Amino acid sequence: MDLIIKNGEIVTADKTYMADVGVKGDKIVKIEKNLKADGAEIIDAKGKYVFPGGIDPHVHLNLFFCGTYSEDWDTGTQAAACGGLTTIIDFAIQAKGKTLREAVEARKADAREKVCIDYSLHGGITDWNERTSKELNYFVSNGIPSFKMFMIYRKEGWMADDGILFQALEETKKNGGMIMVHAESAFILDMLIERYQPQAKKLGAWGHAVSRPCFTEYEAIQRAITWAGITGGRLYIVHMSTGEGADAVRAAQMRGVKVWAETCPQYLLLTDSVFKRKDGHLYATCPQIKKKHDQDRLWKGLEDGEVGILATDTCTFTKKQKDMWGGDFTKIPYGLPGMETLVPVMYSAAVGKKKISLNKFVALTSTNPAKLFGLYPKKGTIAKGSDADIVVFDPNKRVTVDYTKLATNCDWSPFQGMKLTGYPEVTISRGEIIAKNGKFVGKVGRGNFVPGKPGGNI
Ligand code: URP
Ligand code: ZN
Ligand code: ZN
């Protein structure tokens, strides 16, 4: 063996137990008590948890959006590694009139020299014709079984209308793929933005909140669920932010509709009062951050199971980039940093506050995304034969979130000042130690593309 993690408490989605983990090359080869060193490198994990590497299934690196580029693959994935992530899933968004294949090839080329942890891709469908349906079927059985569709972003040229959504869902009933929707009501939203724009200077960042009321999300969620129910297709609600959205997902699941949902730390830990802050524009993301009752309902959704995945929707912009808004809420680059803080912030808020069990935490941040997006059991668990993607997590380490100490190339954090107990100490990716105590120690460009399989479930 090359590496042994000794004396730690292994935590998977279904059990917690004491054993050593033996790694050879890039795989876990032994899980036993008292493994003999025999020349292997030893990590002493006494008093620590041994988690499967975190998986964030919703990130946007080096994405040209709102007139600027989000944080690039290199610093973005170094930061992710420091925060205990070993796999991310980004998006290859089809340009209107172009093929999905072109988008996928371009995204892979963009990541190749820079990505520091393993990654997979969701397709992004913005257009529909016979060629797109053939491509969807091709990718479902060739490594990309999931596709995001934006129900908004008309002016960006990304919006997929209901006709496209319906037809794509029909395909996933047959081929086991997954249609992920960014659910907001395009026409109502655009009308409301126009209505509030004359008051933009007076409203400031609050304009972002008032122009995107809860119904602009849950109407779209209900509509997408209706199409999934009628077609029998497989639907995933990304970055769900409303309590009513969670109600709709739960009701649909009870009726047997194939629908799953993710939420993000910003919707669980922040409220729209952030938009009243002097620097409130920094927090602008879509969908916008909602109210305390939405927060409470989303937490319940995690506990009860209708919300099965924690993701970040990371799309990191610096203060200078956010300053492009010039006081007009319609011009803010939308998106937040988050990969580096996902595991530690949610561990403290969920496990630390006894809202969610340790095993469920691992399910939400690793096993469930691996299962749903077809990466399991290569990723998402600690088992013999799985990739040695492992996090040694110190449950007692006290840390105050401070962007100046984070590895991300960003000069602010939505979670600045939060007091945490518990932090990743060592991150191992395919048997290689890549981050230690918040510092990236791996090689830039070492990440691999990991193909996903269709038909995932949780
Ligand atoms: O505001 C956000 N969320 N930016 C990233 C793009 C998206 O809609 O997911
Ligand atoms: Zn989105
Ligand atoms: Zn997103």
Image (spheres, rainbow, N blue to C red):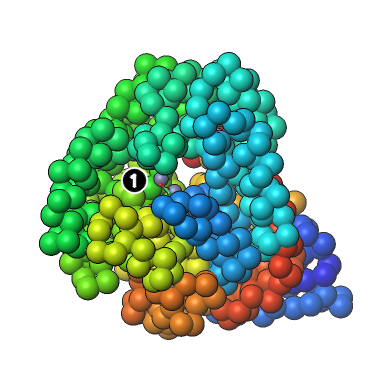
Query: Going by the image, does 166 lie left or right of 222?
Result: right
Residue under the image location 62 percent in, 30 percent down = 99
Query: Which amino acid lies under the numbered mark 1 shown in the image of this protein?
Result: Met
Indicate the position of residue 190 as horizontal and vertical percent values: 25, 39
Whether residue 421 is situated above or below residue 124 in the rendered picture = below
Q: Is residue 223 above or below residue 272?
A: above
Residue for point 46% across, 62% down? 316
Q: Secondary structure at mark 1?
A: loop
Residue 120 in percent (x, y) is at 63, 47
Where in the figure is residue 90, as x and y percent of width and height? Answer: 56, 49
On the image, numbered disc 1 is attached to which residue? 240
Quick check: 28 above or below 255? below
Q: Could you tell whether 325 is left or right of 43 in the image?
A: left
Nearest to the observer: residue 446 or residue 33: 446
Q: Residue at x 66, y 54 (%)?
A: 111
Describe residue 305's horizontal placement relative to residue 217 as left or right: right
Q: Residue at x 59, y 68 (%)?
A: 75
Residue 445 higher or lower than 105, as above or below = below
